[in-house]
Amino acid sequence: MEHARARATFPLFFFVFIIFMLPNPVYADELVVSTDKSSYALGATVNLYGMLTWGGNPVTDGLVAVQVEDCLGSLRLIRVVPTGTLPPPWKVRIVQFYSCDSLGNPRNSFNSGTLAYFTVTVDSLDIILERQVTVALNLFDSVGVSIAVTYATFPVAPGKQITYLTSMPIPDDAFTGTAIACANALTKLPKDDGQPYCTEESVEFTITGGTSQSADSTSASSTSSGGSYSLSFKLPGNAMLGTYNVSTSARYNALAITTFDYFWLYTDVSRDGKVNILDISIAATAFKSKAGDPAYNSSADINKDNLINILDIAAIARDYKKSRT
């Protein structure tokens, strides 16, 4: 009782001070991200999928930011996908997004090998605090190849708007036809614990003068329901080989990462686009090791039997001197 009376006599300003000094509440979200394969051959469709839960229950109106980087840390994809019903924007929204020319005049067709321009206008819904906004754009050609990614970060004053005009290169080998551009507004990039402010906006445009569409093409796509999400895309033909890092994030403080291997030939152990003495050397270093051993190297396990032996060395030798180019 003495302790209770002592606490009751604390000045009111003490409690006000404590309330303002305490961090924002952290919700126990759990975010999961996976790929349907651990390795993807050159030109294959990459499929990402996952689940967002809160207290063990699916979050059916959440947003998940997805970022993919290659082995050199270059950004290859950035998207925001829902986990069901689209939620209202939080603090910032995209109010305008369209393709245009270098002066901002609407335009919906671009030749391959040239620059495409896009205008994004974001609106701050916060009437008190300035907001740091990362605007990220991702372009996909008609067969779902992620052909260009860019982003910029800038402050947006309370209750104000900012318009961002940017250019993005259309590769010479981009597939012709109806392409899509996606725009997102985030607090930061997902790998830096960035979280989506709002749902993704997209616009269609046409690519002309490039490569004709193949019959077995697959467009970039995303789906969602009941707390789950999925995302499919392809990497460009000249994309780096090696380990790709996938970073995902969602409100609040929900993070998840995974990796996948992007290869040209399994026998290209070093993933440098050539089969040579380096690949044999790497396999020889791991010779006689098995999965779980410190020396085991999954890239050198050519036949994927969880053991590195003469069969793997022989497979590399058969492809010796082959080159990606």
Image: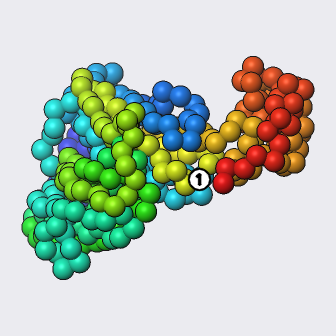
Point 67% across, 50% down: residue: 324
Q: Can you tell which quarter of the image residue 315 is in?
A: top right
On-image quarter of the N terminus: top left
Residue 76: percent from left, percent from top: 46, 53
Horizontally, residue 321 falls left or right of residue 75, namely right
Q: Kindly tell me whether residue 152 is visible in this rendering.
A: no
Q: Residues within 10 Å of mark 1 (few under 14, many from 20)?
A: many
Q: Is residue 113 above or below residue 58?
A: below
Residue occupied by mark 1: 240
In the image, residue 77 above or below residue 294: below
Q: Residue at x 44, y 57 (%)?
A: 173
- Residue 101, given in percent of the width and then of the height, sits at 21, 74
**In the shown orientation, is residue 317 left or right of residue 304?**
right
Q: Position of residue 43 (x, y in %)?
A: 51, 41
314 sits to left or right of 7:
right
Residue at 28% x, 22% y is: 57
Asked whether residue 293 appears in the rendered view, the answer is: yes
